[in-house]
Amino acid sequence: MIEIFSTVSGKIHTEEMIKPGCWVRLVFPTDDELNYVCRELGLNSSDLKVLLDEEELPRLEIEDDYTLILVDTPYKSDAEDITSYQTVPAGFVLMKDYIVTISLRINPVLDAFAGGKYRNLSTERRERFLLRFLYANAGLFVQNLRLIDKRTVEIEKHLKRATRNEELFQMLNLSKSLVYITNSLKGNTAVLEKLSRSPSAFRSLSDDDVELLDDTIIENRQAYEMAGNYSETISSTMSTFASIINNNVNDIMRIFTFATVLLAVPTLIAGFFGMNVAVPLTGNPWAFWIILAASLGLSAFSMIFIYAKFMRGN
């Protein structure tokens, strides 16, 4: 998909053709769309195609005619009824008169840009455009991290009565999500710090732009620390979770064992008196009631003994 935008009087508009001062947005583009953009802007198609590699790491490249920035962006996946949080690269190419963004998935921040939800957004102020995206992207990471923390709290509520591994698998999935997010934030922070140390990456930065870049670096670092803290919390919770599940299963097995022993006593007595040989109480009219009372008495004694010996305090 290819879209072209420009701002007029502070409002964003869709354009039919690429022209100076516009923003060219590419989302999972075809080869024809890539070739068209490269032909119009004088770019190398291989430079854009590498930005579509899901495994590509965040980086910054400063060339004579353009600056290339690649950062990771978070997204929520609900595949197979399992919620997970992953990251995908988003690329920026800053040229003298153009901005090009390229990604494999629709980005919510760029969607908001295109929808006119950000005030005072200008496609002609390319550095400011990039910095506003980077700051909003850091906020998107924080938002996803809070969702992970909320989901973790919800799972913890089931700890005391959990006897299956379902919740454990959910925690494992969240732990994997935090690994993706932590690595992405680490790479993004490195790119931002390199940007702050590379004056040639931007043609001009106002004092407000410098302040926004500093705020973005701080926001990324805070998100990185949050991800690390949440990861440690989930790891600790998973260990506790596994122990609780084992204890709950052991409690259930004790109950089954307890019930088996109680049922074995009357079964044993009934089997003994059911033998086809002479046994005590044969011919006694009260034999049934005596045997029943003995069975109940022995069962009660066994129950009290087992409870006092093995189950009290568990």
Image (cartoon, rainbow, N blue to C red):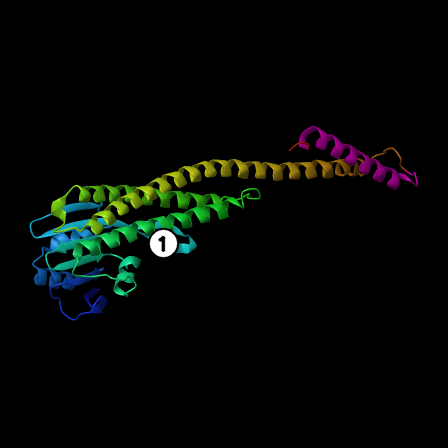
Report if residue 293 lies within the magenta region: yes
Q: Is residue 46 visible?
A: yes
Q: Residue at x 30, y 49 (%)?
A: 138
Main secondary structure type of the part rendered in magenta: helix
Q: Position of residue 172 (x, y in %)?
A: 42, 43
Which residue is at the front of the view, 281 or 1? Answer: 1
From the viewer's perspective, is 233 left or right of 140?
A: right
Which residue is at the front of the view, 41 or 99? Answer: 99
Q: Residue furthest bottom?
A: 16
Q: Quadrant of residue 245?
A: top right
Which amino acid type is shown beneath numbered disc 1?
Lys
From the viewer's perspective, is 274 left or right of 4?
A: right
Q: Quadrant of residue 233?
A: top left
The kind of secondary structure element at disc 1 is: strand
Q: Which residue is mark 1?
A: 76
From the viewer's perspective, is 58 left or right of 268?
A: left
Quadrant of the frame with the N terminus:
bottom left
Report if residue 247 lies within the magenta region: no
On screen, residue 256 above or below 208? above
Q: Residue at x 66, y 31 (%)?
A: 313
Q: What's the magenta region?
A: 283-311
Which residue is at the front of the view, 106 or 132? Answer: 132
Q: Is residue 166 visible?
A: no
Q: Position of residue 5 (x, y in %)?
A: 19, 66
Q: Position of residue 58 (x, y in %)?
A: 22, 46
Q: Position of residue 135 (x, y in %)?
A: 28, 51
Quadrant of the frame with the C terminus:
top right
On screen, residue 102 above or below 303? below
